[in-house]
Amino acid sequence: MNVVTISLALLLATSQDSARRIAIDERLAADAGLRVGDRVSLSATPGDSGRIAIIGAILRRSADPAEIARGEYRVRLHLTELQSLLGYGDRVDRFAVGTTSAQAIGDAATRINSAAFGFHAHRSRDIAVQTSATFAVVSRFHRAIGVITIVASAIFLLCIMLLKVDERRRDVAALRLMGISGRTIVKGVVLEATAIAVFGSIVGVAFGALTSWIVNAYYQSVYRSPVRFSIVTGDVVLLAVSLSLVLGIAAGWLAARRLVRTPPLMLFGR
Amino acid sequence: MLLTLAAASLLRHRARTILAVLGVAVSAAMLLDMVMLSSGMRESFRSLLLSQGFQLRISPKGTMPFDTDATIRDGDSIVTILQGMNEVKSVSPVLGGQLHIPSASGTIASSALGIIPSVEGDYELVGGRQPSAPDEIVANDALLRAIGRSLNDTVHAGAGYDSQLRSLTGERVLRIVGRARFVYMASEQKGVALPIATLRAMQGHAVDKPVSLMMVRLAPDQDIEVMRARLERQFRKVNVISTAEALKQVDERLSYFRQLAAILGAVSLVVGFLLVTTLVTVSVNERIGEIAVMRAIGVRRWRVVAQIVTEASAMMLAASPLGLMLGLVTARYLNSILARFPGVPERIDFFLFQPRSAWTALGLLAVSGVLAAVYPSWRSASLPIATTLRQEAVG
């Protein structure tokens, strides 16, 4: 879609009924100090005298991620008015076509494209895929960062569990000497690791939800957009908790096995 | 002696030390990546903007270059005034548009730049020559591949469509005389450059002579900001953008990545710090009796502290080369992901390696390693010797 620039200047004179009404977005209204009923001058070229229009509405910005980084202002006006302002004649950038049913979309696109010259019919779904390419890249980037974070967490967790179990070498040695089997000791340690992992997961989910809330509050105010930048979904929680449990239990099991394989007297330092 | 004791202590728990080094290496890699990300984009964009030697860019008021379809009407008059200034070495006007080229597989649309070949700064020739006649063009490989043409071939092209007459508007026969690599275009973007007068004529703008962008190369020793302010005062209908201003805009648009880099870099540092602190604390607690004995036989407190700090620093230093290598590999992978951003110039690197980045990451790691060891070591060295010895002997 082409983007056009419209110069907009606030006029202080009283309103005229003949002037056309336009709608502006709330960011422009806030930055330019405009209110409903104000008169503005619209021109396609900076510095031109332009045409008078009255602000008829102030629109809330949509939660469109594509608009985030651009920081553009939006002005909506009647198609004929814009065509005339820009000297476009009857040119348009795009048509939106509604079909009678979902099944008719393909047929309609094929028929339009067979007759078209200089334009092409696309399914809305295809356009959505194309325009969300930026976010697909960001998503892939986040996934890659996530994998690195998981590797770092796994090593950290293994280290901590190793230390935690290592701290109990004397207790384990005593238990072994009393006749408690290595399997029972491993079970006990794994149970303990599970409890720690479960508790850690609960704290982690709560911390993640809080962080997500802070991220949304911060970025929504920075970009002045209702877009939700971070969403804690059931899938995400399930993945995080599963990973945490698996890693925690595996780390506990590995550390416990290593300990029970060491002779009890050696654990006592003898 | 100090190093021997530190090494012996680290080697006593090999598995633990290896895991700690691995953990710190991953943190170091992440830290390096984030330092590279935070400075790389800016540096990469700066060198891209300065690569052609133009310090100022002039675009329609309220827009950044090629952000919109807006143009500066009668841009040639501004070009003429600029060329008459002693402070200005050269001016390169550019008009943006599209060319539509019919081919066997349908009509191919390509970005088109109207330029003055002798002063252009939008592409580098990789084959052939600059256009010297109105009907000569240079094209990039993406376009040549798409239309199946090569140097010295001719193409039919139009600047638009007339849907009612079912024909191209401004149709011309153009000769491809050069292969070009466009500096500001994305990797797969099809691009063509032709004399600005030709593109204007094809678009039907031969009279109003629009310009999308002017790039200005200043004479040596000119103050860029002073000239920027002067030109903006002189030409009210344009934005005059210096490299510094353009970088500020880039910073704003890509602030997300800088903030992400700052947050993840800080998290990596904290994870590395916590890992080393935990290990050093546990290691010190295990050797509390040993430390008390050392103190009892006359080893000074600072020496005990120094030994433990050396252990922590050694772990950090051992992890650094591994972290550096891991960081470079992951940076390359992450860069390959972000390079697929639609519309990002091919030459932009999100993760740009600079020696300063490596030194910054290494410095931060070293400081966090020392800080991680200072408190537990000082605490252990400050314990009452007699009580500790008694507790360790009895307990």
Image (cartoon, coloured by chain):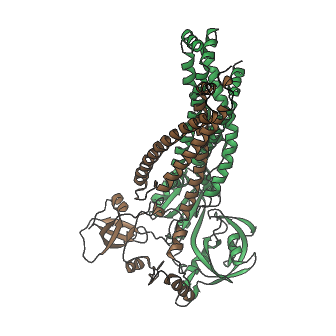
Instruction: Locate residue B109, reporting x and y percent.
Output: 61, 77
Nearer to me, A112 or B237:
A112
Nearer to me, B304 or B92:
B304
Instruction: Locate residue B8, reporting x and y percent.
Output: 71, 23
Nearer to me, B310 or A177:
A177
Instruction: Locate residue B74, reporting x and y percent.
Output: 51, 72
What is the count of numbered marks? 0
Q: Residue furthest bottom?
A: B165
**Which shade of the palette goes to chain A?**
brown
Tell me where residue B150 sits by quadrant: bottom right
**Residue B146 in sight from this viewpoint:** yes
Nearer to me, B246 or A61:
A61
Q: Is residue A27 left or right of residue B155?
A: left
Q: Is residue B48 left or right of residue A44?
A: right
**Residue B362 in sight from this viewpoint:** no
Tell me where residue B97 sits by quadrant: bottom right
* Quadrant of the rendering where the C terminus of chain A is positioned: top right
Tell me where residue B273 sits by quadrant: top right
- B255 lies above or below B67: above
Picture residue at 66% right of the left edge, 69% below the top:
B117
- A218 lies above or below B67: above
**Which shade of the palette goes to chain B?**
green
Q: Residue furthest front?
A: A179
Instruction: Locate residue B287, reporting x and y percent.
Output: 62, 20
